[in-house]
Amino acid sequence: GNSVTQMEGPVTLSEEAFLTINCTYTATGYPSLFWYVQYPGEGLQLLLKATKADDKGSNKGFEATYRKETTSFHLEKGSVQVSDSAVYFCALFISRGSYIPTFGRGTSLIVHP
Amino acid sequence: DAMVIQNPRYQVTQFGKPVTLSCSQTLNHNVMYWYQQKSSQAPKLLFHYYDKDFNNEADTPDNFQSRRPNTSFCFLDIRSPGLGDAAMYLCATSREAGNTEAFFGQGTRLTVV
């Protein structure tokens, strides 16, 4: 079946540090890949996406590259801020008639001043 | 403006007392999803609608039902809530085709007492 594996958290960083959150996937077919962010008590918001191999998604200083050869979609940011503290979910979308999102378990990021 | 709206944000219900959560959308999307999210876990898909076609996940308990009276609205009914059903319930929508994203509401936090 389809699945997404994320590194366990929490990830704790100081402000302006470099961030990497690892995500790997297994899927039959050709999924689209997404990163969602969830702030406390809120729903999920799309952060970035990539729809085919070698695509790079980027938004708000975050980047991730769709690597088909390693089945990975790692999230990176060069300099994190306190306001980036949230839970980050990696997800894949693949067609089962309609597109069904499958989520990883999420990685909590805590950024200290 | 919010495009996927869930009501209420917080719901407290008694053990065994039926409860209904609602979701509305202004996006005119064909697909609507209901997810259950427990603390520190990935959102778990309960079911989804593709237009009026209902698709139940194999492991969704019979205690959970859903209704979609029109494109804009979708309801989650929990017939006899147990303590284990306490969770955040997330509604999401997406277009019917293509490598599209899912748009999420802010969620309803359900407490069972």
Image (tube, coloured by chain):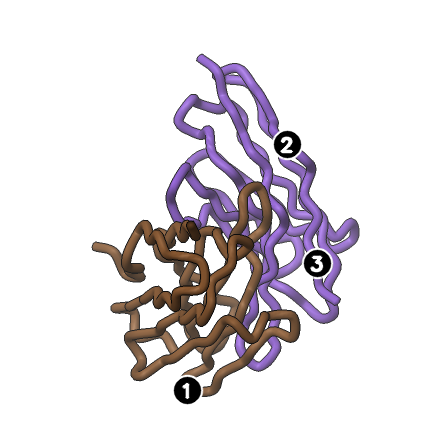
Q: Residue at x 35, y 73 (%)?
A: B74
Q: Name the residue carrying label 2.
A: A9
Along the viewing direction, whichever of A30 and A6 lies nearer the viewer: A6
Instruction: Please tell me the numbered disc located at residue B52.
Output: 1
Q: Is residue B74 visible?
A: yes
Residue B83 picture location, percent across and down: 52, 53
Task: State the brown chain.
Answer: B
Instruction: Please tell me the numbered disc located at residue A3.
Output: 3
- Rendered position, B77 above or below A11: below
Which three-letter amino acid code belongs to the residue tagged 3? Ser
Q: Say which element carries label 1.
A: loop
Say if mark 2 contacts mark 1, CB within 8 Å: no
Image quadrant assignment for residue B14: bottom left
In the rendered structure, the colour chosen for chain A is purple
Which three-letter amino acid code belongs to the residue tagged 2? Gly
Q: Say which element carries label 2.
A: loop
- Rendered position, B21 above or below B40: below
- Which of the two labelled residues, at mark 2 and mark 3, occupies the earlier sequence position? 3
Q: Residues within 10 Å of mark 2 (few under 14, many from 20)?
A: some
Quadrant holding the N terminus of chain B:
bottom left
Dots 2 and 1 on the same chain = no
Q: Residues within 10 Å of mark 3 (few under 14, many from 20)?
A: some
> Does residue B37 appear to the left or right of B29 in the view shown?
right
